[in-house]
Amino acid sequence: MTENTDVIAADAPAEDSPTLDQLEKEGDIAADYIEEFLDICDLDGDIDIDARNGRAYLSVQATDADNLRLLSKPETVNALQELTRLAVQNKTGSFSRLILDIGGSRDARQAELASLVARAIERIEGGAAEASLPAMSSYERKLVHDLVSEHGYVSESKGEGRDRHTVISAS
């Protein structure tokens, strides 16, 4: 079995990036899907749509934080994000890289990832040649690559499928 590795450049342009109009269309389709889902669940939420970095972003917030508590769990957000991507793909015929945030779940996860990266860098500064992080999604690995780069270190993704993870080193 061949190990697949790649080094991610934070500012590398994406090939075949969708246009702003395509991203806005993705966002609208996704918002309709999520709105219908919330209605079925009898939950209230405000949906914000944004397009940046070649992706459509959907954020669902509620004035009552408990209203979205169950939906904001990381596994639930990831599952709902995949269903939403499929709904968008079904309508557009194109793969969607949409990012869904429910009740601030992405910000909370980014803070967790920042903590993981800080601990890994401490291990490297303590003499370790490299530090491996647990397997995570491509989006989370991208966030990690960006965080690592901001600290002046190098990272690469290693492994395949669900075992794909990030390895951090000094150079």
Image: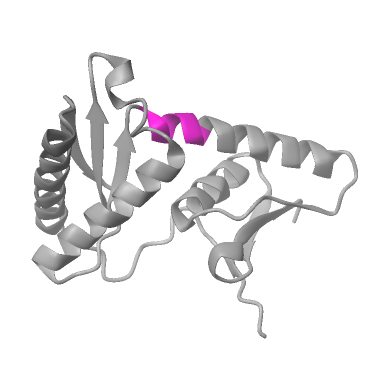
Q: Is residue 53 visible?
A: no
The quadrant of the picture occupied by the N terminus is bottom right
Residue at the limit of the structure toward the front, as seen here: 41
Residue furthest bottom as drawn: 1
Give, as a single range, the part of the protein colored magenta. 104-110
Number of residue marks:
0
Image quadrant assignment for residue 70: top left
- Horizontal and vertical percent position of residue 85: 25, 57
Q: Please tell me whether residue 42 is drawn above or below residue 161 in the rendered image.
A: above
Res 64 → quadrant: top left
Q: Is residue 166 visible?
A: yes
Q: Position of residue 148 (x, y in %)?
A: 62, 45
The residue depicted at 23 percent of the width and 62 percent of the height is 86
Q: Residue at x 50, y 46 (%)?
A: 143
The quadrant holding residue 68 is top left
* Left/right of residue 138 with respect to residue 2 in the rendered view: left
- Residue 103 forms part of the magenta stretch: no
Residue at 42% from the left image edge and 35% from the top image edge: 73
Q: Main secondary structure of the magenta part?
A: helix
Instruction: Report the front residue among 139 and 45.
Output: 45
- What colour scheme has been applied to the protein in the rendered image? one colour
Q: Is residue 151 above or below residue 12?
A: above
Q: Is 53 on the left-hand or right-hand side of 48?
A: right
Q: Taking 10 as reference, is 48 above or below it?
A: above
| Residue 116, image x, y percentages | 66, 38
Judge whether residue 107 is colored magenta: yes
Where residue 157 appears, as percent x and y from the top left, is 60, 62
